[in-house]
Image: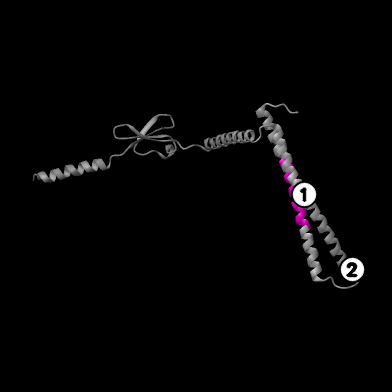
Amino acid sequence: MKASFSTVSSLLVLLLVSQTSHAKYIMCWQNKQNIRECGGNVPPEYAQQRIEVLNERGIVVKIIQARKTKAQLAEEARETKHRKAKEERRRQDMILLKTFTREEDLLASRDKQLAAIDSIITIANGNLKVLNSSLAQLQKQAADHERSGTNIPNILLKDISTVKSQINENDKYLKDKQQRKKEINQKFANDLKRYRKLKEIKPR
């Protein structure tokens, strides 16, 4: 029995469609012997390598770069950090040179900042003396109550606690300001050293 013309045509169309739908890109990689291999699928052990994707004409249409190792990523991170540090150093140098035209200007800026903090410290020390005096008076009142055999009033105990807390806060504030003075001195010492290097000025 002979097949009809329409049936043969349909079979040919199905065959062509099937071939087209199954057409795949070819992928190529290097095996362990450093020999180039190609196929429709990359073996798992080579999946992290550099892969070339070829079309049906053998032309490379895409390159999948090899996944970087932890060592490579760490090295890139170090290089990036180093580069950013150099860029930041250049930026800071430009600011330093634009801010101060002379070494004396830099020292004057330092002295101005230190003087401002010294003024604050003086005020804080004055407040501390007042607080210590107040605490002494309150503690004397409490001692008088104890000597007379009477209970110390709760309001007096509360006042003593409040003043002690204020003294502790004031002490912490003074320590912070003293630390700030050290930081300013250190910063300007570093800036002065760098400034002299950039200007090629010999230390006095």
* Residue 61: percent from left, percent from top: 34, 34
69 and 99: which one is in front?
99
Q: Percent from the top left, x then y, of residue 128?
A: 80, 55
In the image, what residue type sits under mark 1? Ile
Is 195 positioned to the left or the right of 11 in the image? right
Q: Residue at x 80, y 70 (%)?
A: 154
**10 Å crowding of disc 1: few (<14), some (14-19), many (20+):** some
Q: Which disc, if any, is residue 121?
A: 1
Question: Whole-percent x and y of residue 176?
Answer: 73, 49
Q: Considering the numbered disc 1 on the image, is that residue within a helix, a strand or a loop?
A: helix
Q: Which residue is located at x 88 percent, y 70 percent?
A: 145
Report helix, strand or loop for mark 2. helix
**Residues tagged 1 and 2 counted as in contact (Cβ below 8 A):** no
**Position of the N terminus by quadrant:** top left
Splitting the image into 4 quarters, where does residue 18 fall?
top left
Locate the C terminus by quadrant.
top right
| Badge count | 2
Q: Is residue 22 left or right of residue 174?
A: left
Residue type of the residue flagged with mark 2: Asp
CA–CA distance in space, label 1 to label 2: 34 Å
Q: Residue 144: which numbered mark, if any?
A: 2
Relative to 28, residue 157 above or below = below
Q: Is residue 195 visible?
A: yes
Q: Which residues are magenta?
A: 167-184
Residue 169 is covered by the magenta coloring: yes
- Give the residue furthest to the right: 147
Q: Residue at x 72, y 26 (%)?
A: 202
Q: Nearer the viewer, mark 1 or mark 2?
A: 1
